[in-house]
Amino acid sequence: MPDRLTALDASFLYMDQPTTPMHVGSVAVFRKPRSGFDYERLVELISGRIGLVPRYRQKIKQIPYGVARPVWVDDTDFDVTYHVRRSALPGPGTDRALNELVARLMSRPLDHTRPLWEMYLVDGLSGGRVAIVTKTHQAMVDGIASIDISQVVLDDSPDGRDDPDDDWVARPEPPSWKLVLDAVGEAVARPGNAVEAAHAAVRDAADTVTKVAGVAGGLLSAVRTAVRPAPTSPLNVPISTQRRFAHARTELEDYRTVRRAHGGTINDVVLTVIAGAMRNWLLSRGASVTPSTTMRAMVPLSVRGEAAATGAISGGGLLGNRIASYLVDLPVGEPNPVLRMHHVAHAMREHKQSGQSVGANALVRVGGFAPPTLHALGARAASGLSRRLFNVVVSNVPGPQHPLYAGGARMLEMYPVVPLAKGQSLAVGLTSYDGGVFYGFNADRDSMADVDEFGDLVTEALAELVATVPQ
């Protein structure tokens, strides 16, 4: 019997609209090895390892008359070269040109008649670099078994590893009449599933994500937050179908320096940096900023054990196998960066003491380089929550603090691309990797024309914090 989409996965499929495509992305920049790295090498690499991610050779098939949720079926016409594509930047191959290409790629919806992923090899970057851009639909990241395809191409050594044996043969696609009979049989055997499917089609998205949390505490916390809407913000406007993308590079040691001087966690420093950048961005737009001005961030964090309560993220490797999401009011009205950080740290401690995680607590079991998968899980939580609850998404996922390679090419940088939810003109994703902290800013093209400047403000806000540390 085909694998049926869960109610949550199906909801992300149905939420896929022209202005809110439900795919999460990543931009990885590599230095070419002396032996070279080209499109044929990438296709060979993907072909040898795609057996590790079976979902990437499956597509979604709808059930006639909508009598049940869709199912996953093997793509009998699977063609890896359709999904792995190539592009090139015009000289001189600047980072800005790469960002413009990423924005165009992320604006395009995925083809729902094929497996819901794409990968692009981007050549022509200055300094002998290449980039790999990925897009994966959130319906494919189920939080239990699925991982992102970019994880399976990365190795700890430039020598790589042996590819697994792969004797995959596509199973014939079941006829429509059989899918209907299977659905009817399931409804008779488990009538509760049919009721659940009907409810899922009309349930408010916030309730869907609360179902993922599966805990009364999360529900009560969500209700308490819902009665206190997010502050009015120029970030929360109707959005278009087109995107802009920008990035910022920072050093992990700067965050550690601030943490050692002022306490808190690495994530507290990150949120303080975002708050400082938000403050200066509002001022640059001539917006009114008073001492009490706040911006509410939805913060999905990868956590484990005690870190699930603290929201702590360290700089050394992947901490955990759980996603906890918090709503944090960032004190953008506070002009003093140290006091700003104390406010943020206090807010995060409040989450620890109350045990209130709002949104999603999704269990995942992933290995290797997990940031793409964990960013996708955080984006699922953000997409499901009502836009009245928060102003911006800040998805922070730690990566390994040692070099990784794809086909012998060393990965230099990794920028996440977190999708926009309805009414959200900016989503912030960041990943720590090999001593750096890499921010990706996905923004609406019409309402966030100054996203490049926002990236500069992030680096300035970090420098302002570092300057408060006594030498």
Image: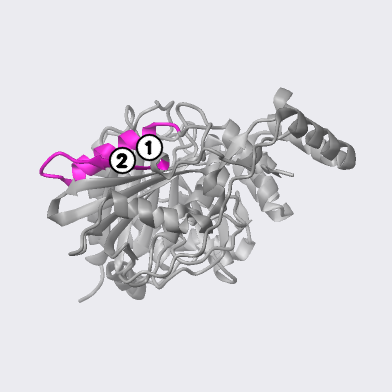
Could you tell me the amino acid type at mark 1? Met
Q: Which residue is mark 2?
A: 102
Q: Quadrant of the C terminus?
A: bottom left
User: Horizontal placement of 225 versus 429: left or right?
Assistant: right
Q: Nearer the viewer, residue 103 or 287?
A: 103
Rendering coords of residue 122 (x, y %): 26, 46
Q: Specify the quadrant of the image occupied by residue 44.
A: bottom left
Q: Is residue 95 magenta?
A: yes
Rendering coords of residue 180 (x, y %): 77, 30
Measure the C-alpha gap from mark 1 to mark 2.
6 Å
Q: How many marks?
A: 2
Give me the disc on residue 59. none
User: Horizontal placement of 67 versus 145: left or right?
Assistant: right
Residue 234 visible in the displayed image: no
Could you tell me the amino acid type at mark 2? Val
Residue at x-position 39% and y-position 31%:
108
State whether residue 59 is above or below residue 273. above
Labels 1 and 2 touching (C-beta < 8 A): yes
State whether residue 100 is above or below residue 268. above
Q: Which residue is mark 1?
A: 106
Rendering coords of residue 321 (x, y %): 56, 65
Which segment is the magenta one? 83-109
Q: Nearer the viewer, residue 213 or 104?
A: 104
Which structural element holds mark 2?
helix
Residue at x-position 52% and y-position 40%:
115
Residue situated furthest top in the rendering: 65
Rendering coords of residue 306 (x, y %): 58, 71
Q: Nearer the viewer, residue 119 or 453?
A: 119
Which structural element holds mark 1?
helix
Q: Specify the quadrant of the image occupied by residue 107.
A: top left
User: Horizontal placement of 151 versus 360: left or right?
Assistant: left
